[in-house]
Amino acid sequence: MRLARWRPVRDWLVRSTENSAPGVWAGIACRKRCIDDKFAEAILAGVDSIVILGAGLDTRGYQPMVPSGVRVFEVDLPENIADKRKRIPETGTVTLVPVDSDTEDLSR
């Protein structure tokens, strides 16, 4: 990832990926935009809680667009949550929820 900050490496990465999977970068950009739009719509609609399943290293819950009083629950595999806790501290608005949906029941 650090190497991808350097433009020639990033350009090579995009070109090689597009050669093997045409359109993958455009698909990622469209998916990200759709999720961002739905997130913003939910906030504007006045929801007070948002659950992000499979959050990974997503940082939407930490963005300034999240008003105070809106709780964000980021649900992911325990190992992903542990990694995220090392990288990003939990805040009063974001709660990290470790769940292995293969062996645990999310409804509890």
Image: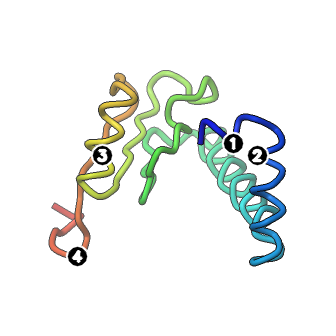
Count neighbours of disc 1 (C-alpha within 10 A) and say few if under 14, some if 14 to 19, many if 20 or more.
few
User: Which one is in front in this view, the residue at disc 2 or the one at disc 3?
Assistant: 2
Q: Which residue is mark 3?
A: 81
Q: Earlier in the sequence, mark 4 or mark 2?
A: 2
Q: Position of residue 56 (x, y in %)?
A: 44, 51
Q: Are marks 1 and 2 in contact (CB under 8 Å)?
A: yes
Q: Amino acid at mark 1?
A: Ala
Q: Position of residue 94 (x, y in %)?
A: 38, 33
Residue 99 sits in quarter: bottom left
Q: Which residue is mark 2?
A: 9
Q: Is residue 74 left or right of residue 28?
A: left
Q: Is residue 64 left or right of residue 98?
A: right
Q: Are marks 2 and 3 in contact (CB under 8 Å)?
A: no
Q: Which residue is mark 1?
A: 4
Q: Amino acid at mark 2?
A: Val
Label 3: element kind? helix
Instruction: Locate the N terminus and report the quarter of the image it occupies.
Output: top right
User: Which one is in front in this view, the residue at disc 3 or the one at disc 1?
Assistant: 1
User: Which one is in front in this view, the residue at disc 4 or the one at disc 1?
Assistant: 1
Gap between marks 1 and 2 measured at Cα: 5 Å
Of residues 56 and 3, the one drawn nearer to the viewer in this rendering = 3
Q: Amino acid at mark 4?
A: Asp
Q: Which residue is mark 4?
A: 102
**Residue at position x 27%, y 47% in the image:** 97
Gap between marks 4 and 1 measured at Cα: 34 Å
Of residues 3 and 104, the one drawn nearer to the viewer in this rendering = 3
Q: Is residue 20 above or below residue 108?
A: below
Q: Earlier in the sequence, mark 2 or mark 3?
A: 2
Q: Are marks 3 and 1 in contact (CB under 8 Å)?
A: no
Count neighbours of disc 2 (C-alpha within 10 A) and say few if under 14, some if 14 to 19, many if 20 or more.
some
